[in-house]
Image (cartoon, rainbow, N blue to C red):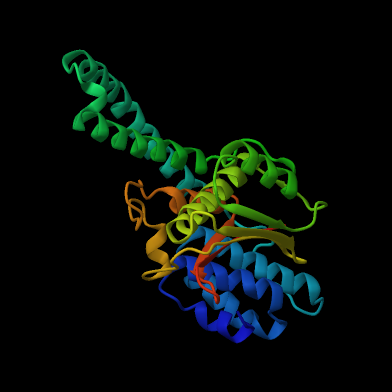
Amino acid sequence: MTRDEALQQLNSDTSHHRLQAARQLARCASAGDLVVLRRALRCEPVSFVKRALEQAISRITTNSPDVTLDSGEVDEPVDAERRAYRKAVEWVTNSLLHEILPRFGAIKLESKKLLADYDQSTLKARIDALTSVLDGIEELRKASISETIKETNIHDLITKILSEEFRSHTINVSCQGSREITVIADPNLLTLALSNAVRNALEATHIVDPSGSIVIAWGETDVDYWITVLDNGPGLSGPSEAAFIIGRTTKSGHRGFGLAIARQAMMTLDGTVSLQSASGGGARLEIRWFK
């Protein structure tokens, strides 16, 4: 994305697009863009986009000694709304699980007692499907909470995820990135985001070629870290934002939580997850978060 494209995208109706634009401008904006950035900040209703705009403004004012802060402009991002949003997600998911899980467990137990052929029944298949949805809600809850911030080596984290969760998969995984990049972040949130991104890529590639391959690459710029997952699947069949809607999936038998969980986890880290068609076919998912 160029600087001019980012400035234009600040007017997007989609908050995630505005966030991408603000982060791009943190890398390439100049002092002459401060008027546009400050106007966007005053009009922005979404807390995590505000935070990115504030960081972009802060980087410009820090690197340009002659530029001063506007009256009322703060050096540190105000993240009360961002915390409130995460708390809302946590509260809703906690409430759902608290109310549903005990009743669901009782239904499952009674069904096993009443049906002699329970394991082969359509009821079991439907209960298993609901179990998958509840698992998705639990992961969404976890994605809204940051509990442990510590040094995490990206190469080691990716290696651990692949060995623990995807060892038996037939798809070949190629990893490209420095072994030396260590970040300060919540490894649980990074694991949630990356494991769901990798799972999505593996499943998409398997549709086209069960012995195909995906590429995981990572690196850093002067302002952020990035991880990309490139698959050889069928690509996007509609708008990329549709892939992040909870319950929306093009894969038969899937719950449609994966990319929504990945995005929520990265939002909790003040990061982004974007998805686009790859030039050679398939799709390219990118995770970014500020240093």
In this rendering, position of residue 268 left or right of residue 71: left
The quarter of the rendered structure image containing the N terminus is bottom right
What is the number of callouts on the image? Answer: 0
The quarter of the rendered structure image containing the C terminus is bottom right
Q: Is residue 49 above or below residue 196?
A: below
Q: Quadrant of residue 235?
A: bottom left
The residue sitting at 63% across, 53% down in the picture is 173
User: How far across and how far down the image is residue 190, in percent?
Assistant: 61, 46
Q: Is residue 268 visible?
A: no
User: How far across and how far down the image is residue 265, in percent?
Assistant: 53, 48
User: How far across and how far down the image is residue 27, in percent?
Assistant: 70, 73
In this rendering, position of residue 222 left or right of residue 228: right
Q: Is residue 180 above or below residue 73?
A: above
Q: Nearer the viewer, residue 210 or 76?
A: 210
Q: Is residue 152 visible?
A: yes
The residue sitting at 53% across, 59% down in the picture is 48
The residue sitting at 65% across, 36% down in the picture is 148
User: How far across and how far down the image is residue 98, in percent?
Assistant: 35, 27
The residue sitting at 59% across, 55% down in the picture is 270
Q: Is residue 133 above or below residue 124?
A: below
Q: Is residue 193 above or below residue 141?
A: below
Q: Quadrant of residue 2?
A: bottom right
Q: Nearer the viewer, residue 78 or 112?
A: 112
Residue positioned most to the top = 113
Q: Nearer the viewer, residue 62 or 88?
A: 88
